[in-house]
């Protein structure tokens, strides 16, 4: 092990605070002293946000051991505790809290020593990433540069190191076979082992589950099983037994759908019972999730090219290191350590995924290396696909020809909630802003998107005149959507753009602001400088709700209607089943009831709507 680092270390728990100076033993310190010293000199710490929370100093920054571990060992997990980090680097855990601060420097030295080892597996790409992190002012960058040798040849770019997926022939349709219940029970005994306890309920369930593997009665209707069982029955192996038999005999794919990602991981952990060989298991059992769980390479490229700033830019570099060594690019429950996004702004991690269906598919320059496409194609060749209810509902909505024909719904009582979430649509102010950013691209000094839709589809649209015209029309239409700060502009009475009439009318009806009555009259109302305060209350359940104005984008269609009658009708449709009531008018209360005109009464006497 190399020489100890000449840096202090800070360790804070609920039991106390300890500081270890260079060459001295650790000692206890007060909260004020720890904050003052951390503000003056960077300290080696473990999980900066957690330490800052315990110190009452959220702006705490320093040399976080978790960030160093994520750089040196991407796509590898370590328990984010003192004992867990010691075990990850091969050190003995400290015997007490007082020795934990001293162990921080030993952990840092052990991690930095890896940079000089010739058998370091994650060496490729480290030099390029360290240089970028040094320009961003990352605290560990100078210490890494002192130990990391510059490669003799230039390193390959990140995206050229990712493996491409290959097109394969379509899988033949499954053969028609029948699964005998006794065979399913025999497979169950083999999976559970001879030493396991025999459970009558589990054996009975395995026999009953064979019914869904009978021939389908209708061409476009899959055979489905909603699995529910009490605690201790063992339903997972009960339905996996006939499922594995059917996939082997028929050559088809069985989808097992769960409601939570935690149960997906639990099902994946049962894989060694079915296939002992790791390579065979990875090929025949595939975990599928929604697109929002996987890293989007195009968003990552934008982040690496400057769309992220500050700490978020450091996160993008560490995620880029992880992407080169990740098994499947899954950022939620995959091989990305769950604590890594929490060290930074969580919005930075979510911006690297495809959250809102913004993928351009074959128009993307990284389409052949896309993690989402790899997972989808691996699922076509797998025997068992472990998915979730939301993904199954999305596939049902698309009505694809290669949809699964045998589906087992574990946690089946959640299936209806998943269906409601999938087939419902919510489009609010923030959604409209995100759509405008995605289509139009950066505007002014905005750094949210490095590219608009035109830049993303440049290769496709450059050869298609009609496509280019449609793209221009989409950009022009997107400019009518609200941009950043739209709510504040309406409150201040200064909206602009094509949505100005609707903004003005909404401001007259329903915005936050000083308690002053404003009138909306005529086809072109004057913009009010002060507006009334409204609240939206359900008809039967009286409680405060989010401001009515937050639903303003749903009234976008009313922006082209100049008459008050049409606007009133739009508001009636929006608040159907609710009651909008204002106490802002000094002259009395006003209540808007669905299906009727406005009613005015005294401020002292507020008669609820019938």
Image (cartoon, rainbow, N blue to C red):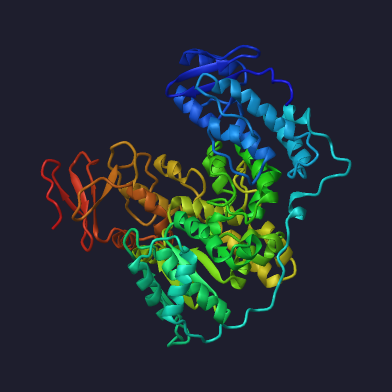
| Image-based side of 126 in relation to 95, left or right | right
Work out whether 338 lies above or below 461. Answer: above
Direction from residue 60 to residue 200 in the image, left or right? left
Q: Residue at x 53, y 67 (%)?
A: 385
Residue 226 sits in which quadrant?
bottom left
Asked if residue 532 can be seen in this view, the reply is yes
Assign the C terminus to one quadrant of the image. Answer: bottom left
| Image spot of residue 280 (x, y percent) | 64, 65
Q: In the image, residue 384 lies at what x, y percent?
A: 54, 69
Reply above or below: 78 against 328: above
State whether residue 391 appears in this view: no
Measured from the top left, where is residue 50 in percent x and y? 49, 30
Q: Which residue is drawn at 67% across and 66% down?
A: 362
Which quarter of the figure is the N terminus placed in? top right
- Give the farthest residue toward the front: 195
Looking at the image, residue 370 lies above or below residue 67: below
Image coords of residue 420 (percent x, y): 37, 65
Task: Compare residues 532 and 52 and report the one nearer the observer.
Answer: 52
Count of number-bearing discs = 0
Query: Within the image, what quadrant is residue 426 found in?
Result: bottom left
- Between 460 and 380, the residue placed more toward the observer is 380
Q: In this view, does 592 lie to the left or right of 204?
A: left
Quadrant of the image occupied by residue 71: top right
Q: Which of 397 and 248 is in front in this view?
A: 248
């Amino acid at each position: 092990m190399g020489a100890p680092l000449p840096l202090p270390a800070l360790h804070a728990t609920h039991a106390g605070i300890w500081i270890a100076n260079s060459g001295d033993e650790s000692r206890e310190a007060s909260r004020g002293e720890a904050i003052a010293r951390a503000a003056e000199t960077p300290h080696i710490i473990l999980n900066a946000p957690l330490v800052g929370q315990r110190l009452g100093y959220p702006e705490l920054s320093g040399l976080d051991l978790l960030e160093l571990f994520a750089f040196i060992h991407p796509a590898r997990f370590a328990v984010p505790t003192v004992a867990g980090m010691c075990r990850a680097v091969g050190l003995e855990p400290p015997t007490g809290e007082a020795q934990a601060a001293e162990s921080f420097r030993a952990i840092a030295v052990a991690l930095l020593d890896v940079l000089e080892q010739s058998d370091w597996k994650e060496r490729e790409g480290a030099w390029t990433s360290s240089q970028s992190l040094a320009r961003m002012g990352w605290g560990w960058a100078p210490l890494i540069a002192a130990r990391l040798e510059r490669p003799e040849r230039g390193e390959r770019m990140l995206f050229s190191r990712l493996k491409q997926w290959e097109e394969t022939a379509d899988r033949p349709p499954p053969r028609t076979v029948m699964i005998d219940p006794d065979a399913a029970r025999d497979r169950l005994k083999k999976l559970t082992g001879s030493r396991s306890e025999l459970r009558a309920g589990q054996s009975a369930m395995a026999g009953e589950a064979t019914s869904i593997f009978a021939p389908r009665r209708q061409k476009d209707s899959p055979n489905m099983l909603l699995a529910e069982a009490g605690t201790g029955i063992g339903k997972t192996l009960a339905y996996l037994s006939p499922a594995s038999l059917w996939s082997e005999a028929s050559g088809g794919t069985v989808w097992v759908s769960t409601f939570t990602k935690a149960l997906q991981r639990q099902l994946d952990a049962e894989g060694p019972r079915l296939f002992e060989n790791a390579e065979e298991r990875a090929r025949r059992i595939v975990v599928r999730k929604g697109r929002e769980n996987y890293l989007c390479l195009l968003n990552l490229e934008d982040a690496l090219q400057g769309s992220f700033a500050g700490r978020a830019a450091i996160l993008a570099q560490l995620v880029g290191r992880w992407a080169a060594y990740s098994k499947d690019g899954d950022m939620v429950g995959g091989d990305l350590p769950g604590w890594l996004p929490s060290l930074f702004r969580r919005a930075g991690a979510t911006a690297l995924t495809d959250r809102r269906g913004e993928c351009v598919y074959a128009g993307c320059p990284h389409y052949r290396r896309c993690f989402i496409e790899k997972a989808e194609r691996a699922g076509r060749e797998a025997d068992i696909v472990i998915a979730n209810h939301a993904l199954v509902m999305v596939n049902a909505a698309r009505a694809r020809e290669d949809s699964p024909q045998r589906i087992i719904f574990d946690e089946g009582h959640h299936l209806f909630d998943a269906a409601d979430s999938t087939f419902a649509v919510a489009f609010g102010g923030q959604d409209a802003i995100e759509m405008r950013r995605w289509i139009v691209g950066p505007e002014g000094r905005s750094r949210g998107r490095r590219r608009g839709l035109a830049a993303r589809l440049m290769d496709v649209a450059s050869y298609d005149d009609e496509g280019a015209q449609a793209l221009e029309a989409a950009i022009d239409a997107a400019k009518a959507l609200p941009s950043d700060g739209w709510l504040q502009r309406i409150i201040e009475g200064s909206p602009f753009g094509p949505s100005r009439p609707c903004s003005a009318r909404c401001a007259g009806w329903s915005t936050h602001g000083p308690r002053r009555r404003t009138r909306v009259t005529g086809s072109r109302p004057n913009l009010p400088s002060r507006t009334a305060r409204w609240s939206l209350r359900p008809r039967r359940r009286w409680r405060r709700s989010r401001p009515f104005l937050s639903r303003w984008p749903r009234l976008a269609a009313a922006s082209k209607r100049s008459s008050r009658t049409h606007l009133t009708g739009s508001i009636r449709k929006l608040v159907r089943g609710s009651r909008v009531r204002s106490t802002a008018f000094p002259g009395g209360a006003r209540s808007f009831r669905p299906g009727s005109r406005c009613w005015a009464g005294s401020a002292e006497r507020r008669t609820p709507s019938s």
